[in-house]
Image: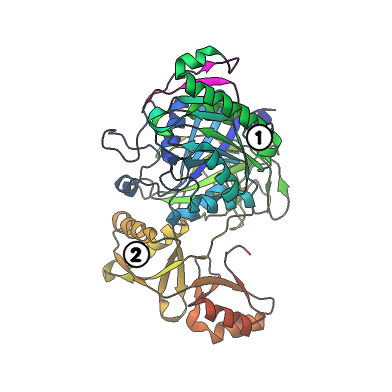
Amino acid sequence: MALKEEIAKRRTFGIISHPDAGKTTLTEKLLLFGGAIQTAGAVKSNKIKMHARSDWMEIEKQRGISVATSVMGFNYNGKKINLLDTPGHQDFAEDTYRTLTAVDSVIMVIDCVKGVEIQTEKLMEVCRMRKTPVICFINKLDREGRDPYDLLDEIEEKLDIKVRPLSWPISMGKTFKGVYSLYNKTLHLFQPSKTKVEGDGMTIKDINDPFIDKEVGESYANQLREDVELIEGVYPEFDVDEYLAGNVAPVFFGSAVNNFGVKELLDCFIDLAPAPKSRETEERVVAPDENKFSGFIFKIHANMDPNHRNRIAFIRVCSGKFERGTNYYHVRADKKIRFSNVTAFMAQEKELVDEAWPGDIVGLYDTGNLKIGDTITEGEKGVYKGIPSFSPEIFKEVVNKDAMKTKQLEKGLNQLMEEGVAQLFSYELGSRKVVGTVGALQFEVIQHRLKHEYGASCDFMPMNLYKACWISSKDKKALNAFVDSKYRHIAKDKDGKLVFMAESRAWLTMVQDNFPDIEFHFTSEF
């Protein structure tokens, strides 16, 4: 019984969006409501002295962006909420894709000035692939933005998902008056509060109540009534099952930086969002309420504390109860492994935990045994599916600047690559090492971290490569012949899989035509 109760209490979700739409700010405000922090920090601000809790890496403070996914847990209204704030910046998309494998639902933040942007479309594709339920939060209503109806149409059109507003704004920008909640019929008047929690809204039994006219002015009140009538007329009744199936997205309006509309979002979220769900392994589907523990590693962070050079692997508990100090089975390595140091997170601040339940995300201190995608169980051999590496888009060769520090450079590169910051390809010929990333900013992050965390310095020389293709074939002879004939262009990834480094699209097409027995893959999971 305890297991079922614990599962019902859990809500594990990620916050995703385009850069600068306000994800990290929203994360801070959710923590504020959860009582996890007393004052919210800001990502970029001269007036607010505190930095955002979830951006704790030195480079994040300098740039005012999130570079790594941070994991935070807090309690709210009797529910245990596990929240993952992801980087929106396209250059760190890999980290976000992997994080989406570990959550049960998603809050997508959209900027009311800019609307739906390219990166949001890509993230939505990943959610659609996995049928993840999505709630939309349209942010920054304290600025002059676009018409709410236009925004709703754009979300439906570009993100290919139906929407249903559950709250509605009264004007925006300088004349922004507040938000009316269609979900629980309350009116919230806007008073900008940057860092503290505001009081509850006023419950309005009848939208024609003259009290509304007094509070927001007659013309705004009439406009609100028209809007509500139109919404109830145009959009079908909100259906929770459709939301859980990933077909319809409830929409909320607010201003995260002013702490406005966040509480309605959170209250509704814990009502609607799914508890931890079943997951597939290669062998079978595992239900969360099974007695035996299982989970998978979706993220690794080296050097969370530079003084101790520690490596933390983040595990998502999928079934059963995880207990500290118990021997568990590491499927890939085929051996028993014991974790005596297990932590729960509040961004960088950690606390020791003795047990964790399905939906929880805990950190395991690791000396290098674990990799992204590893499955840990109580003895069963199935591996959880769905944590791919994508072919990178930019390739650069590593040039060591200090021959005395070769060992540090190798160690640093290997550890950062195991974190999944980027991918490392080692050529058989001439022992050249090539780093592949999704965006240019990652090279700066790698250089910065190699220097500050490992004391190694290197340069990156641009290379003219189009794609890294993982290769496989049913015919072993054909594969060997291919590798022999193209040995100058063959490298291995960090797991030792063979990769063909194609220089241009035309050339790749030609090679594919000439070697019909060889299969070329653009993700490492095939």
The part of the chain drawn in magenta is 180-208
Element on which disc 1 rests: helix
188 horizontally vs 60: left or right: right
Dot 1: within a 10 Å radius of its alpha carbon, few (fewer than 14), some, or many (20 or more) residues? few
What is the spatial separation of the Cα atoms under label 1 and label 2, in whole angstroms?
60 Å
Element on which disc 2 rests: helix
Give residue 451's position: percent from left, percent from top. 29, 58
User: Circle 1 sits on which residue?
Assistant: 234
Residue type for callout 2: Leu
Does the magenta stretch mainly form a helix, a strand or a loop?
Answer: loop
308 horizontally vs 522: left or right: left
- Give the quarter of the figure containing the C terminus: bottom right
Give residue 502's position: percent from left, percent from top. 51, 76
Find residue 6 and report its image quarter: top right
Q: Residue at x 37, y 30 (%)?
A: 174
Contact, mark 1 vs mark 2 (Cβ under 8 Å): no
Give residue 392's position: percent from left, percent from top. 48, 65
The colour scheme used to paint the residues is: rainbow
Vertical side of 178 occupied by 282: above or below: below
Verify whether residue 278 appears in magenta.
no
Q: Determine which of the numbered discs, if any, sits on residue 409 in the image.
A: 2
- Give the quarter of the figure containing the N terminus: top right
Between 292 and 215, the one lying in front of the other is 215
Give residue 146's position: percent from left, percent from top. 46, 40
Residue 61 in view of the camera: yes
